[in-house]
Image: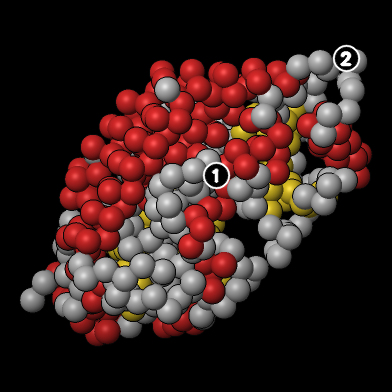
Amino acid sequence: MCLSIAVLVFAVLCGCFWEDAESTPEFLPMDDSMYPYAGLPRVVIETEGFHEIRDRESEIPSNFQMYGESEPETDVLSLTVRGRGNSSFKMPKYGMKLEFTDKVSFFGMPQSRDWALIANYGDKSHLRNYMMTRISEWLGARYTPKCVFVELYLNRKYMGVYLLSETVKVAKNRVNIAENDSSFLFEKESSKKVDSPFVTSTTGYSFHVKSPKNLSETSKKMLVSHLNDFERFLAGDEFPDAPSMLDWIDLDDFLLYYWVQEFSKNEDANFARSIFMTWEKGGVIHFGPLWDFDLAFGNASYDQNKSPEGWYIREYRWFRLIARNPKVWSAAKEYWRAHRDDFKNLIDSIPVYRQMVEPALKNEYKRWPVLKNTENWALKDPYDSYDAAVEAMEKWLKSRLNWIDISVF
């Protein structure tokens, strides 16, 4: 009998389950007889009363414990859990937002109360979001969300392979900007879903303001005014005191951000959603951090985005107007020449990343047998095997690299 099953039996005998406990239990039971240990940490979560996670707003009191191969590796921790994600939350396997009562650290990542479990249901390789973090760190982004692969058991049911990830928030070890009424972290959102508080520019683009947390009317007007002025500049209106694009954006941040999005043809990055920026009064706009790459690296929900050829990000909205600036595009070409080997190394590293997660995907695809599924909008391409899914991505990336080389050089 493996220890995890023994723990389950002991819990039954002792009445140590959530619903019978008046205080935090010493451990959470986990039965891994159907989904055995596969080399990844196991996250065990039980919600109060085994309450279902039905929306992205309700914060459900819960308990959390991390298991290794045969025993718990953390105490039972208190937290709240709610759903997370945009359209991905509507999928059978969905993401979750975790907010712990006290700050916690996992696998050497800095302490925080806020974490995310990213489902990657629409990515049959399960590698795309992780690969984004690698290239972002290699290129020296100001902040890249740290993450680790885990397997999740929710309310004693196996949920599959997830990324346990830092969230995008203002903090010393995350997005490191001042926390005051004139410093902003904001996210371009889809018109189909806008989280409050938000601001809308004169062109109709909406931005969810993540910091400051309590957005005053004065701060709101300050941010809207700056965004509107920037859009006037992009449209070609004259600004005698700001003759250069560099008076509006940090060019280094933009070039890094642009090339990761362009190289991957990230479908959401056509200025649709998950576009994070910061701005502090008197300064320039900084693009980043990078986030949400399940519909990237050849995994497209729209047929017109499947080809590894052709420009993508530079053809849309703000990015089109920024990239058409001759100085910006000249710098962009130089950036590619200087860093294209980093993108090549990302492709070469795919076998390493695959080895990290592949054993656990036997459990994943037993629970969610979607490799051949094309019914969900994010599961367009059928594959006979996991090998085929990874090989298709790798082939696409090599073609993408070659096309950009030809176009830039």
What residue sits 38% from the left and 61% below the top?
A: 123
What residue sits 33% from the left and 63% below the top?
A: 124
Q: Quadrant of residue 287?
A: top right
Alpha carbons under labels 1 and 2: distance apart: 32 Å
* Disc on res. 239: none
* Disc on res. 241: 2
**Residue 155: where, in percent of width, then height?**
39, 77
Check disc 1 and report its element: helix, strand or loop: loop
**Residue 222: where, in percent of width, then height?**
87, 35
Check disc 2 and report its element: helix, strand or loop: loop
Q: Quadrant of residue 194?
A: bottom right
**Observer-nearest of 406 and 170:** 406
Q: Which residue is mark 1?
A: 312
Q: Amino acid at mark 1?
A: Tyr
From what the image shows, is residue 40 above or below residue 157?
A: above
What residue sits 39% from the left and 75% below the top?
A: 374
**Residue 260: where, in percent of width, then height?**
47, 37
